[in-house]
Image (cartoon, rainbow, N blue to C red):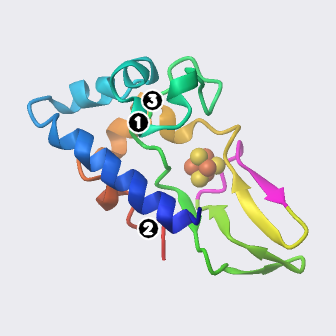
Amino acid sequence: MSYKKWFDAHGKKHAKIMERLTHLSTDEVIKYFVFENMVKNEVDFCPLYKDNKKCHDLEDLNCYFCACPNFRFNDEGFRLQDDKTLFSYCNIDSKDGAQFFGDTYIHQNCAGCGVPHKEKYIKSKFKRNWFEVMKKVTP
Ligand code: SF4
């Protein structure tokens, strides 16, 4: 699946959930998106939920900002880097981010980074419209 296909489909799932949470305050919405609650109540939101598996080994994992507002992707590729096509990168160059190198491609590897999954960060960027928060992620 291309980044864009995933991005559009995931944003729609997020919007559907938010349609049901209009009665909740910002803090309550953020709490709703805590991993343990999402696994129980929103099993279709993430393919890992059915196995009760986390994408990041974080005790307080929050899924509101999956993906991440700092992620940048381009399915056509941004540019060449070391003769490979760079398809994604981290806009804040997070110290916990990494790159995944293939023979012809480079993708951002966020596995070690918890930035968008922390409640404090989510509060600082919070918007009910996921696509609005993510508007810089895709060209
Ligand atoms: S490395 Fe962290 S901050 Fe950067 S895009 Fe990935 S999850 Fe976001």
Q: Quadrant of residue 114?
A: top right
Q: Quadrant of residue 83?
A: bottom right
**Residue drawn where x is 15% and y is 30% of the image:** 25
Type of amino acid under label 1: Asp
Q: Quadrant of the N terminus?
A: bottom right
Report the residue marked by disc 2: 136
* Residue 98 x/y as whole percent: 76, 50
Q: Secondary structure at mark 3?
A: loop
Q: Find out whether residue 126 is within the magenta segment.
A: no
Type of amino acid under label 3: Asn
Residue 7 appears in view: yes
Q: Earlier in the sequence, mark 1 or mark 3?
A: 1
Which numbered tag is attached to residue 62?
A: 3
Segment colored magenta: 92-101
Type of amino acid under label 2: Lys
Report the residue marked by disc 1: 44
Q: Earlier in the sequence, mark 2 or mark 3?
A: 3
What kind of secondary structure does the magenta stretch mostly adopt?
loop
**Residue drawn where x is 71% and y is 45% of the image:** 95
**Residue drawn where x is 66% and y is 63% of the image:** 89
Q: Secondary structure at mark 2?
A: loop
Marks 2 and 3, how far apart in space? 21 Å
Q: Nearer the viewer, mark 2 or mark 1?
A: 1
Frontmost residue, 17 versus 112: 17
The extreme left residue here reads: 23
* Residue 137 x/y as whole percent: 48, 64
In the image, is 22 to the left or to the right of 104?
Answer: left
